[in-house]
Amino acid sequence: MVKTITPFSTRAKEGATDAPLGDFVNVDQNITSVADVGHYDINTGRLTGVPTSDRVFIAYEKQDEIANGGTAIAPSANADGSWPLSMVGYNDIVLAIKPSNGGNCAISAIMGPDSNSFMGLTPVNPAALLKGCIDRNSVSDVGFDTLVYDGTESLTADVWNIFMIEGRLANQDLLQFSITNNSGGISTIETAFVRFV
């Protein structure tokens, strides 16, 4: 505790006098930590927690025998209800792809299915390339750009090929990835994701 002078005494506050008297009051000098755990929805009364980074890969999926030129959409329907991905409250995402046949593939971030809403809006344009303005510091380039598209990424077979995507998909709801097999043969494609706050 620290004592500090007040401009008027408690007696002045009570109306006994209007002259500044130099009273001292105790001022608490302790630091109190506060944890933000989320907020309560005013309509439902449910607590919505603050997102934390995923500790392990989520939405693991294996799609068998994708033909050359065929596309795997990930994540698709998973038993854990993790599809499509929500990046609301997250900044970065890691995409992991494990093909059984090495070679090129095209990878893009797309809008999820129109059977789901985008933050309450429905219908959405399903499988459309995600677009946005991501450079918050530039005023000269304000056009909408494709957020993630790589037409010829070479993948190694039977190992996890891991890609970090920083900031480009922050707060994107209803997120899926389109992975087109251009390896020249049939490939089984496994995918998984980790999100970071």
Image: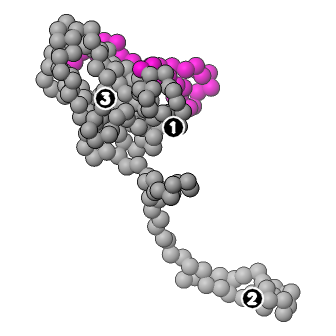
Q: Amino acid at mark 1?
A: Met
Tell me the residue that label 1 is attached to. 119
Name the amino acid type tagged 2: Thr
Question: Which mark is first along the chain, 2 or 3?
Answer: 2
Residue at horizontal 84 percent and vertical 93 percent from the top: 16
Q: Nearer the viewer, residue 45 or 102?
A: 45
Q: Which residue is mark 2?
A: 10
Residue 93, by quadrant, is top left
Residue 185 in which image quadrant: top left
Mark 2 secondary-structure assignment: helix
Front-most of 150 and 32? 150
Query: Mark 2 near mark 1, Cβ–Cβ under 8 Å?
Result: no
Identify the residue position indicated by label 3 in the image.
76
- Residue type at tag 3: Ser
Residue 87 or residue 163, whichever sits in front: 87
- Closest to the observer, 30 or 4: 30
| Residue 12 visible at all | yes
Q: Earlier in the sequence, mark 3 or mark 1?
A: 3
| Separation of residues labelled 2 and 1 (CA atoms) | 53 Å
Magenta range is 127-156
Q: CA distance from mark 3 to mark 1?
A: 19 Å
Q: Residue at the location (46% across, 57% down)?
A: 47
Task: State the mark number for residue 69.
Answer: none
**CA gap, disc 3 to disc 2?**
67 Å
